[in-house]
Amino acid sequence: MGITKETVETTLTTKLQPTYLNVIDTSGGCGASFSIEVVSAQFEGKKLLERHRMVNSALAEELKEIHALSIKKAITPQQWQDLQAQEAPPANQ
């Protein structure tokens, strides 16, 4: 049995305290491949590579069983707000 989506969510929630977290098991349920979007204040002042290292470090034990990890987003709450504002449809006036 591989790692579950819930295990990844619990670990990242505990270690990175995200304000938004989206974990998708892209392996069809066997737990070998995950796609992750994470928004955390702990990323403030960190470069993208450092953020990815933080995610990988948080999942160190899980990565022993995971074959592929795709970090789609590792951003700060402010970057998340800016992104949401850009994606929001214009308000009708």
Image (cartoon, helix red, strand yellow):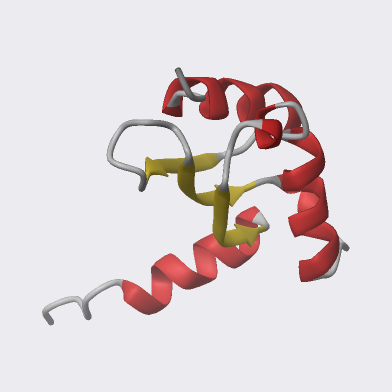
Question: Which quadrant of the rendered structure holds the N terminus?
Answer: top left
Residue 10 drawn at (x, y percent) = 57, 20
Corner quadrant of residue 15: top right
Corner quadrant of residue 59: top right
Residue name at image x 22 percent, y 76 percent: 89
Is 5 left, or right, of 68 in this rendering? left
Q: In this figure, what is the number of numbered marks? A: 0
Is 29 left, or right, of 71 in this rendering? left
Residue 53 drawn at (x, y percent) = 82, 53
Front residue of this view, candidates 28 and 82: 28
Corner quadrant of residue 42: top right
Question: Which quadrant of the rendered structure holds the C terminus?
Answer: bottom left
Residue name at image x 31 percent, y 32 percent: 29
Front residue of this view, candidates 78 and 69: 69
Is 34 left, or right, of 51 in this rendering? left
Residue 16 drawn at (x, y percent) = 72, 35
Residue at the far left in the pictured view: 92
- Is residue 44 among the parts visible in the rendering? no
Q: Is residue 26 above or below residue 71?
A: above
Front residue of this view, candidates 47 and 52: 52
Residue 35 drawn at (x, y percent) = 46, 51
- Is residue 27 among the parts visible in the rendering? yes
Q: Is residue 69 above or below residue 15?
A: below
Residue name at image x 66 percent, y 29 percent: 62
Q: Is residue 5 above or below residue 67?
A: above
